[in-house]
Amino acid sequence: MERMTAPARFIILVIGIVVGAAVFLAPRGNEQLAMLQDEDKHAQIIALLEPRVARGENDPNLLATLGRAYGEVGSYQRAIELMERYTSLRPDDAEAYARLAKLYGKVNDVTRQIAMLERSVAIAPTLARAIDLAALYRQENQVDKELALLSRFESELTVGNGLLLRLAELHASTGDREGAIDILMRSEGLPAPTPLTQTGDARIFLARLLVESGRNAEAVRLGKEWILQWHEPWLADRLLRGIVLESPVADASELADAVAALHPEIRFFLVRGLATMGAKPVARHLLSTWVKENPSPSANEIAGFLSACREQGEPEIVWQAFGEVLRRPASNDLVARYSEAIAAEFGIGALAPFWGNLPQEVTEQRPLLAAQLAFHENNPALTKWLLGKVDLATVGTSYRRTWIDLLMAVTSPADAFGVLRDLRRGGRLPPDLLPQYARLAGELGQEIEYRAALVDLGRNVH
């Protein structure tokens, strides 16, 4: 075959370009565009299609494709111009108006964004677009339009996505409290969302509406059901706080009792929170019923109760509670726990009015407690005798500090030294009392005992 001349090669090249362009402009060109869109080659799409638009082509699909490409690369004004031309040719395309709404959102033209979404929803009333439009109405404080829109879609709204609550809030904001209640009461019959805690905001708002409408008993009844379903202390607390100030004390106290019974670990937290927000009568009620609900509390639980009463300025609740414990059949150990906790929280003098009613076994089992009261009543001899009954190995560090303080208060340094020396020689002096013993030995010139105490202290350090 003869070699092709240069002019011939040029002619063939031109023909190839023309044919290639023709192929692209043919139906298969749409396939090529689709491939470019799939590969996110928006710049290439713009380079291919913009010249055609510039030549005056007004094909709707061409305009839409080019508009989407410009939107993807951030040229929002050009994208808007092209999509507006497209919708003038295809005025029933709901998706195109939704896309235009997003583009107007990109350039912060909220008025046009709302207008485009309104057209989209008018053509194809889907919940997803209605939600977007309702959010814009809310942003622009267009309450009437938001209410009308959500009411139109009420059958599709749920508690889980928060839209039923929003519809109820809109009714309430326009003065239609009963309408808001009806909406939320109907939602109680619908399948509950998962997790169930998603019902929290709607139910708390419903309880508030019921209380504001004077339907307190209904709010309490529902509230007691809800806290059992939630089984979440933080939600129960929110519910109680949501209605406590607007409810009669008796109704609020009934709900507070239910919350505390289901979540006893937050009772004193509730007391503090309710008192802080001004619901002191209900806070006081939770304190006054604590003893009945806790017939056999631990020492730590009693200490928490006493601390809460003192914090709220309600010491009389403590005296009433202790009086109830003494009147009813109670174990000596329980009486002793209360007695020690009261002495620790309010001082030993607080026990004086009850001393004659304490079982004798309590004073025998708690000689340190008896010694404290004897000292309070200025009876040093009895105090010293009772201190001798205390087994230091069976009491905690704080009790041993009380013991040594009382010993130093009712005896001379020499006598106190003698008591401690006998305990040490008998192997019954706890290590935490060695510093006091060493100090006494040093002050009294007991050199041998002083050095021995220092050696013992050194062993305990290591």
Image (cartoon, rainbow, N blue to C red):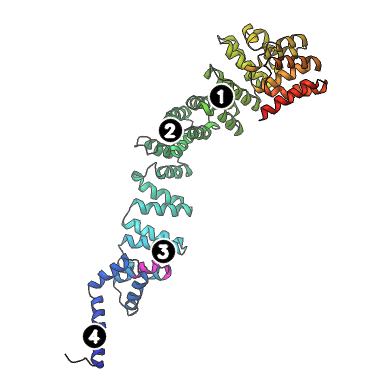
Look at mark 4 in the image and give the residue it sits on: 15
* Residue 119 horizontal/vertical position (percent): 36, 59
Helix, strand or loop: magenta stretch: helix
- Secondary element under disc 3, as helix, strand or loop, is helix
Q: Earlier in the sequence, mark 1 or mark 2?
A: 2
Look at mark 1 in the image and give the residue it sits on: 286
What amino acid type is highlighted by mark number 1?
Answer: Leu
**Badge number at residue 230:** 2
Cα separation between marks 3 and 2: 43 Å
Q: Are marks 3 and 2 in contact (CB under 8 Å)?
A: no
Q: Does any portion of residue 412 appear in the rendered image?
A: no
Q: Bounds of the magenta span?
A: 66-77
Q: Earlier in the sequence, mark 3 or mark 2?
A: 3
What amino acid type is highlighted by mark number 2?
Answer: Trp
Q: How many marks?
A: 4
Q: Earlier in the sequence, mark 4 or mark 2?
A: 4
Look at mark 3 in the image and give the residue it sits on: 103
